[in-house]
Image (cartoon, rainbow, N blue to C red):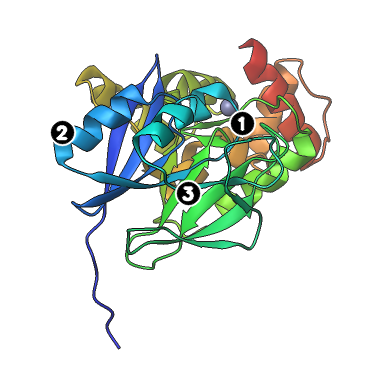
Amino acid sequence: MTPLRTDLTVLTVPAFKDNYLWLIHDGINAAVVDPGDAAPILQALQAHGLTLTAILLTHHHADHIGGVPRLLEHAGVPVFGPRSDGIDAVTVPLGEGDRVAVPGLDLELAVLDVPGHTLGHIAYVRDAPDEPWLFCGDTLFGAGCGRLFEGTPAQMADSLGKLAALPDATLVYCAHEYTLSNLRFAEAVEPGNKALQMRIENDNRARGAGLATVPSNIAIEKATNPFLRTTEPGIAESLVAAGKLAPGADALTTFAALREWKNVF
Ligand SMILES: [Zn+2]
């Protein structure tokens, strides 16, 4: 059986200094992920002649939910979001194992719990084999990961492990353009990583041309993102050499030390 494929597009909508809001559409209807600001979304809807049919939220921070009230004035759509991240506007609470049939679109998303950045943070996965997507909010970034505002290193390491286990081709739609700054840290941690050197070249070229470095994919992140590579001996060696880690530490201690180092890098 070959199901009919409706072509879906993901529009990159920049907001604030370095946020990306994601607008998923089929040319008629659209769902927005993490609308921190309503104005650029309303503008994009109008420019492309789209009707808003759903709002999807990953966590409670203002730069991810700030635009929700104004969007709801514009269109009374369901608001999907984490069950336990304290967001009043959520009308369809979600957690690990839930699946979302996105209203108005031929799109199904699976939900993962990814605590760490916030305690209730969730991620959305389109597990279609032809074009898998991940909307991971502030959990996984290009060559980096979110700060641990609420969760523990163990929670974040576990959450990143779930994302790293997704298929290599999964496009990573994270919520910020932090890649170049993350790559500078990654290079300090893993100076001998050839895939990382190639990524630094590519992403610098992209930013130089005014392009987004996002989405990347899971294969690229596994090859270059130090937070997904804490079992590589070179990473622990760099931490030890920098005086950030005692020799012989396990992967979780290494992860915690790596996150600490990035905070002050
Ligand atoms: Zn956040």
Residue 228 as seen in the image, left or right of residue 152: left
109 or 234, nearer to the observer: 109
* Mark closer to the observer (2, 3): 3
Per the image, label 2 sits on a secondary structure element best described as helix
Question: Quick check: can you spot residue 212?
Answer: no
* Residue under pointer 1: 60
Taking the view exactly as shown, the residue that stands out farthest to the top is: 264
Q: Is residue 219 above or below residue 42?
A: below
* Residue under pointer 3: 78
Q: Position of residue 186 (x, y in %)?
A: 53, 26
Residue at the spot 64% in from the left edge and 40% down from the top edge: 121
Marking on residue 118: none
Q: Name the amino acid type tagged 3.
A: Pro
Residue at the spot 65% in from the left edge and 11% down from the top edge: 264
* Residue under pointer 2: 47
Q: Name the amino acid type tagged 1.
A: His
114 or 33, nearer to the observer: 33
* Mark closer to the observer (3, 1): 3
Q: Position of residue 148 (x, y in %)?
A: 70, 27
247 or 34, nearer to the observer: 34
